[in-house]
Amino acid sequence: MSAVVVKLSSRNQMVLPKEAREALGIKSGGRVLVIVEGEAVRLLPEPDDWAEYIYGLGEDVWKSLGGGESFLAEERASWEK
């Protein structure tokens, strides 16, 4: 792990250090996803395929609902009442 201090310009812009660009695989003109989590900020390269990137994000929720099948069955049964 390494740390580099960067300075914000008068327009609140900064240069992403070479080490960070290389670690993220970002070239000139590339785009960065900025995720703010409380007081921490994570930088990720923008996904090439957003559908693939978000695939499976709700998997834990569906598992907690019985894999989704029982949840769907209950919902559909409630429509018939």
Image: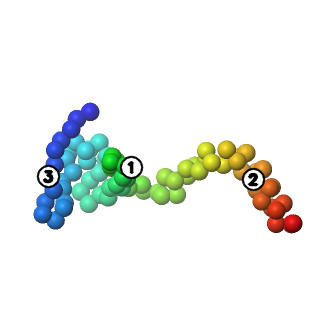
First of labels 2, 3 by sequence position: 3
The answer, for residue 44, to whether it is visible in the render is no
Give, as a three-letter code, the residue at label 2.
Phe
Quarter holding residue 73: bottom right
Report the front residue among 51 and 73. Answer: 73
Task: Say which mark, if any, is on residue 7.
Answer: 3
Q: What is the number of the mark on residue 37?
A: 1
Identify the amino acid type marked 3.
Lys
The quadrant the C terminus occupies is bottom right
Which numbered disc, 1 or 2, marks the residue that appears first in the sequence? 1
Mark 1 vs mark 2, CA separation in Å: 31 Å
- Residue 4 is drawn in which quadrant? top left
Residue 71's tag is 2
Using the rendered image of the protein, determine whether residue 9 is visible from the camera's viewpoint.
Answer: yes
User: Mark 1 belongs to which amino acid?
Assistant: Glu
Query: Does residue 3 appear to the left or right of 62 in the view shown?
Result: left
Instruction: Report the front residue among 70 and 30.
Output: 70
Most extreme residue toward the top is 1
